[in-house]
Amino acid sequence: MTVSAGRVSRVVVTPVAFRDPPLLNVVGVHQPYVLRAIVQVHTDEGLVGLGETYADQAHLGRLEAVAAALPGADVFDLHGLRRIVAEALGESTGGAGASFGGMLEVSSAVDTVVSPFEVALLDLQGKAMGRPLSDLLGGAVRERVPYSAYLFYKWAGHPGQEDDDWGEGRTPEQLVAQARRMVDEYGFTAIKLKGGVYEPRHEAETVEALADAFPGHKLRIDPNGAWTVGTSVEMARLSGVLEYLEDPTPGIEGMAEVSKHTELPLATNMCVIAFEHIKPAVAADAVQVVLSDHHLWGGLRRSALLGGICETFGMGLSMHSNSHLGISLAAMTHLAASTPNLTYACDTHYPWKTEEVVKPGVLEFRDGGVAVPRGPGLGVELDEDALAALHEQYLKCGQRGREDTAYMQSIVPDFTPNTARW
Ligand SMILES: O=C([O-])C(=O)C[C@H](O)[C@@H](O)C(=O)[O-]
Ligand SMILES: [Mg+2]
C-alpha cells in the first residue's frame, strides 16, 4: 500500500499577536504583544498541516514568498522544500541573513524560513499515516517531556496598563514567589532565571535564594552575554548550585576563555545558533551544552541532526525557547521526546501566555512536563475562531516586529543594550 498525503494545493500564512507581560532582558523589555506567524499547508487530498514561527515584517515577507512557491510540492519531499525555499529567497545570489530581537544574527535565512513549512509537512505526513510526529523522528524515547520554570525579572505591568497577576519581579523574594507559583502549578523540577538585567551580585543573590527555597531543583541562569569574561568566571563560583551557566559572555572566543577557568558546563543559544558555528566552538572548547531550537535550526529533522553532532563531540543538548503558542509547543515536545540525548529540561515561555490558537485538552503541563501528543501528526487542532481573533489583535496592536530595546527606550530613554556591560 502506498501512503500519500498528496501535494500542496494552498498555503496560508496568518500573523497573530498575543498578550505578553513586561519581561526584562539584556536588550530591553518585552512589548505588550508577541507576534507569531501561523502557517497552514493545505493538500489536494483535503489535509491541513500546521507550523508556527516568528512574525517580524522581513520574515513574513520571506514566508509569503515560499507560500507562493510551494503549491504542487510533494508533502514527503523535504529536500525539495529546502530547494524551493533557497530559490524563493534568492540564496544562490547571496540571500539574506536574519536577526532576532536584537540579540542574534545568522548569515542565511533559509533555516528559519524552512522551519514552519517542514513542521507543517511532517504534520501532514503523520496525519496521512495516522502516526504521531515523534514516530517520524525515530519514535518517542520518553512519554513526557520535562520543561523548566522560566523566571524573569519583570515590571508589575506595562506602563499605562493595570498590573498583571504576576506582579513585580525584582527582588530575590519576588523571584522565589514567581518560581513557587510555577512549581506549584506545573510541577517543574528545573528552574531557569533570565539574567543580564541587574548587577551580577543581585542576580547571584536571586540564584542563591532560589537554591535555598527549592533544594534539589536544577538551576540555571542566562544573562545573554551581559557579563565580561572576568565577571563570568566570578559568577561561575555559583557552580555548587547550577547545572549549567548559559551565555555568560558574548562570542565563541569569550566563552572559550571563561570555559578555561571553570568546571561548570557552559551552555549557549547565542554563539552557536547555526551549523556554521559548531566547528569553531568545538575547536575552542567554548561550550559544553548547545540549546537547540527547531525554529532557528531549520526544522525538526535538522534539530535531530544537531543532536547527533552534539553526541559525537561529547556536548550536552538542551532546548531554547522564545515566546510561543501551542503549535510550537507541540513541535518542541515531539522533537524532545524523540531525541535520546536531549537530557535537560527544555525551556519554554508557555506559562507567561494567556491566549492560544490550538484547541485545549492536549497540551498540559503536569509533573513538570508535557505528555507527547498521541494523535496523528502534531496531534493538535487549530481553533479557527481563536486564530481569527488573534489575527485581528495583530492588525490592531500596531507592533510589526520584536523591538525590546526601542520599547524600553520609550520608557527609559537612557537605556543602552550593551552586552558584556558588567
Ligand atoms: O535563552 C534565551 O536566550 C532566550 O530565551 C532568549 C529570549 O529572547 C529571552 O531572553 C526573552 O524572551 O526575553
Ligand atoms: Mg539563552
Image (spheres, grey):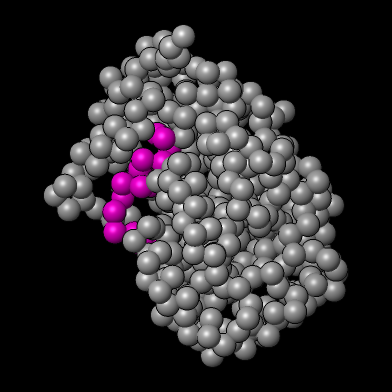
Nearer to me, 159 or 128 = 128
Q: Residue furthest front?
A: 312
Task: Indicate yes or no whether the magenta region holds residue 298.
Answer: no
Quadrant location of residue 278? bottom left
Q: Examine the rendered structure and indicate whether residue 132 appears above or below residue 25.
A: above
Q: Examine the rendered structure and indicate whether residue 2 appears above or below residue 134.
A: above
Q: Who's the residue at 85% across and 74% down the image?
A: 212
Residue 182 in the image: state x and y as whole percent.
Answer: 77, 54
Q: Who's the residue at 59% across and 27% down the image?
A: 132
Q: Examine the rendered structure and indicate whether residue 260 appears above or below residue 337.
A: below
Residue 377 in the image: state x and y as whole percent.
Answer: 55, 26
Nearer to me, 16 or 84 = 84
Magenta-highlighted residues: 102-118
Tell me how many marks there are: 0
Q: Who's the residue at 71% across and 56% down the image?
A: 149
Task: Indicate yes or no whether the magenta region holds residue 103.
Answer: yes
Residue 410 lies left or right of residue 202; in this view the side is left
Residue 9 in the image: state x and y as whole percent.
Answer: 33, 17
Residue 230 lies left or right of residue 217; in this view the side is left
Quadrant location of residue 89? top left
Q: Is residue 21 visible?
A: no
Residue 183 lies left or right of residue 196; in this view the side is right
Q: Is residue 283 visible?
A: yes
Residue 54 lies left or right of residue 159; in this view the side is left
Q: Who's the residue at 57% across and 18% down the image?
A: 130
Q: Examine the rendered structure and indicate whether residue 363 appears above or below residue 210.
A: above
Residue 51 in the image: state x and y as whole percent.
Answer: 47, 34
